[in-house]
Every structure is written in structure tokens, then in C-alpha cells.
Image (tube, helix red, strand yellow):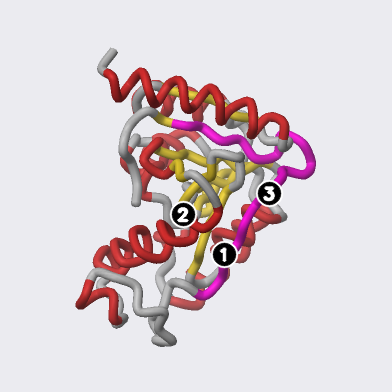
Amino acid sequence: MTPEQTRNEKLAQCLIKTLTAHGFEAYYCADGITAKERILSLIAKDDVVSWGGCATMEQIGVIDEVRKTHACIDRDTAKTPEERQTLMRNALLCDTFLSGTNAITQNGELYNIDGNGNRVAALIYGPKSVIIACGMNKVVPNAQAAYERARNVAAPINAQRFNLSTPCLKTGECADCGAADSICNVFVRTKRCKPQGRIKVVLIGEALGF
């Protein structure tokens, strides 16, 4: 293994202990290929699956696979904005919800910001099971670092991704704006998982997502 891979694995093992103590199920996979296999193994064959905007799940091929193998609530199939909203609401009662996280702290807390709130709503309550895919690039020392990563890394990149009318589209940095297109509307810190094991965190030893 490279020094970076060795560090990722050691850090992940420490983080798994902390996450487990906080009620999460936690796993480490060295790369996206093994992470995809692990995530798919956590989804029962009869589960109805949905997801929020999750670049990591897309990058490692999970979304494409579950579209083939499971009944899905897929907002991208909507023909109208109204239908899209209905699908997003229905997703809150799916069996398994797939997501990423904007950051995860070394003391085992998830930190997320959201534009519409549907992704963090599913994380908080609703779906029977939530699976989080998290590249080790998103592991930060503490809550302040998590906040700064979400605002100054994840949000500006997603603004470019979706071509939003926000100041960070032009500057690449957060302006703490009140723009109508802002995707920094809802802030959620997940300290513990209740009921135990509902949220599964799959740490991946690669730089993935935003």
C-alpha cells in the first residue's frame, strides 16, 4: 500500500470505532469497487430504493446498478416539476435511501447542508435504512472544519455542477448569500444514530464526491 492508503485505513479504523459507539454501522473499503459491492450487499433484494443528489454513489456505480436490480423512486424520471416533487416526498418512505455526506468529523459526527432539505430529511427520519458513502477526503478534525468544508468546498462545487445563480458560481467561494438559488438552506449535524444501525456509513479510501 502507498503511505496515503495506509493512513486512510488506520484513520478509518479509528473512525469506525467512534461511529459504532454512536450507534452507526460502519465499514471501510479501500476503493470504489469494493465499496460498491459492500453497499449493494446492505440492500435487501425486495427493498424500494431512492437517493438524494449523491455524486459519490454515482461515481462508484451504485445508482446505475440499483436502477437495474431494484424498484426505485427516481426523481430524474419525472416529466414535470410537480411530479419531481411528488417523487422526492415519496422517497422519504422508501426502504433504503442512498446518500453521501458533506463532511464527517473524527469524533464520528456527520455534517450536511441541503438546498431543498429532502436529502437531510431522509437522513433524519423516514426510510428504514440509510446508507452513506464517504470518501476519506471528507474526514475532518472537528465540527468547525466540517462547517467550513461544506460551505467552502462542497457548496461552491455543486453550484458549478448545477449552474446556479449564486455568488459562489462566479467566485468559487462562499459569500454566505441569500440568493434564491442557494443550496445552503438547511444545516444538519448528526451526532448519533437512532435507532441503532439505521444509518450505515461506508468509508472509502479514495477522494470521492465533493
Between discs 1 and 3, the one toward the N terminus: 1
Q: Nearer the viewer, residue 57 or 183?
A: 183
Residue lying farthest left?
A: 170
Q: Residue at horizontal 77%, vertical 36%?
A: 196
Residue depth check, mark 2 versus mark 1: number of the one nearer the observer? 2
90 lies above or below 49: below
Q: What is the spatial separation of the Cα atoms under label 2 and label 1, in whole angstroms? A: 24 Å
Q: Secondary structure at mark 1?
A: helix
Q: Which residue is mark 2?
A: 145
Q: Which residue is mark 1?
A: 118
Q: Which residue is mark 3?
A: 191
- How packed is label 1: few (under 14 Cα within 10 Å), some, or many (20 or more)? some
Between discs 2 and 1, the one toward the N terminus: 1
Q: Position of residue 72 (x, y in %)?
A: 52, 47
Q: Position of residue 206 (x, y in %)?
A: 32, 32
Q: Secondary structure at mark 3?
A: loop
Q: Quadrant of the N terminus?
A: top left
Q: Position of residue 97 (x, y in %)?
A: 58, 46
Q: What is the spatial separation of the Cα atoms under label 1 and label 3, in whole angstroms? A: 19 Å
Q: Which residues are magenta?
A: 185-203
2 lies above or below 130: above
126 horizontally vs 147: left or right: right
Count of all numbered marks drawn on residues in the image:
3
26 lies above or below 198: above
**Residue 8 - label:** none
Please, what is the three-letter code of the amino acid marked with disc 3?
Lys
